[in-house]
Image (spheres, rainbow, N blue to C red):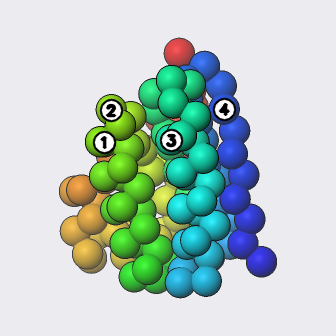
Amino acid sequence: MEKITILKENGLTEIIINGNLNIHSIDLLEVRFRDIISDSGTTNTIAVNCENLDSIDSSGLGMLISLSKQAEKNDIIFYLCGLNQRVSTLFDISNLDRYFKILTMDEFRQIAHR
């Protein structure tokens, strides 16, 4: 079962995805993201923590692109962080690593503690 956890602190919202991001789980992510966006003024940065993301399909990739565009429209910085080897390889092959701001977990922690 996929689980999405939201952590908020000092204008930074971290979305932690555990499990798979696919056609069956993207709706939950979209709903949670809309809740974050609608709570305007409390978030200026969103980081999707993919450290525990087991797999992602084309629907999941499409959802991440959509979320990134929504964040940009709302003047919110959007990061992906903690991509494991499988997911990172998929981003490299599809050239999506050029589209997203991708951080290691160490880089993310530095941003989170500023």
Q: Nearer the viewer, mark 3 or mark 1?
A: 3
Q: Residues within 10 Å of mark 1 (few under 14, many from 20)?
A: few
Residue type indicated by callout 2: Asp
Q: Is residue 101 left or right of residue 114?
A: left
Q: Residue furthest front?
A: 38
Residue under label 4? 8
Callout 1: helix, strand or loop? helix
Residue 12 picture quarter: top right
Determine contact: label 1, label 2, CB under 8 Å. Answer: yes
The answer to whether 13 is drawn above or below residue 34 in the figure is above
Q: Position of residue 102 (x, y in %)?
A: 38, 49
Chain-order first, disc 3 or disc 1: 3
Looking at the picture, does residue 80 appear above or below residue 39? Answer: below
Residue drawn where x is 72% and y is 72% of the image: 2
Disc with the residue nearer the chain's start (2 vs 3)? 3
Q: Is residue 89 visible?
A: no
Whole-number angstrom distance, CA of label 4 to CA of label 2 = 17 Å
